[in-house]
Image (cartoon, rainbow, N blue to C red):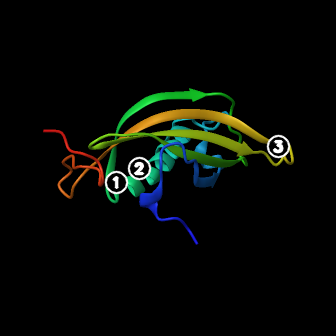
């Protein structure tokens, strides 16, 4: 049985997304775009933030993003996310990105790491309190 999202705590790493790098994700030279990888990391982080916020979130800052190794067409990309900090309206998430490469069986390669901050928002797009967090006066 899966743990309820509100039970997530800082430091608990979650496999948030897995996707295959495809030829459409590359430039004319065949290199996977860095922006594509950043997008996958942002999606992964937002899934965890959404669970914590119990609703809609928006990316407000990419605090850091490091590309460590290239991603190749055919790589299975896995993004693991963990809560770094929960504020009154914001949630900072760390994301680590790994690939499994068909040309190198049984090897997992760490290709990127990021820290992204999201803000919980209401139906009008205004910041709202993260459930269970004290509000500032």
- What residue sits right under mark 2 in the picture? 49
Q: Earlier in the sequence, mark 3 or mark 1?
A: 1
Where is residue 105? Give x, y as percent.
87, 47
Where is residue 112? Give x, y as percent.
61, 33
Q: CA distance from mark 3 to mark 2?
A: 29 Å
Residue drawn at x 47%, y 49% as measured from the top left: 9
- What residue sits right under mark 1 in the picture? 53
- Is 100 or 119 nearer to us in this picture? 119
Tell me the element at label 1.
helix
Quarter the N terminus occupies: bottom right
- Which residue is farthest bottom? 1
Seen in the image, is 4 located left or right of residue 30? left
Where is residue 86? Give x, y as percent.
37, 42
Q: Is residue 19 above or below residue 94?
A: below
Residue drawn at x 65%, y 28% as measured from the top left: 68
- Which residue is farthest left? 137
Q: Earlier in the sequence, mark 3 or mark 2?
A: 2
Q: CA distance from mark 3 to mark 1?
A: 35 Å
Contact check, label 1 and label 2, Cβ < 8 Å: yes
Seen in the image, is 99 located left or right of residue 128? right
């Amino acid at each position: 049985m899966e743990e309820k999202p509100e039970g997530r705590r800082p430091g608990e790493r979650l496999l948030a997304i897995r996707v295959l790098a495809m030829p459409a994700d590359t430039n004319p030279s065949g290199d996977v775009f860095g922006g594509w990888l950043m997008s996958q990391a942002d999606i992964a982080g937002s899934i965890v933030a959404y669970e914590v916020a119990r609703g809609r979130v928006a990316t407000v800052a990419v605090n850091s993003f490091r590309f460590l190794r290239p991603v190749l067409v055919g790589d299975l990309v896995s993004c693991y996310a963990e809560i770094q900090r929960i504020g009154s309206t914001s949630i900072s998430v760390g994301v680590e990105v790994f690939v499994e490469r068909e040309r190198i069986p049984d090897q997992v390669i760490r290709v990127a790491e990021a820290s992204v901050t999201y803000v919980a928002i209401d139906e009008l797009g205004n910041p709202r309190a993260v459930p269970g967090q004290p509000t500032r006066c």
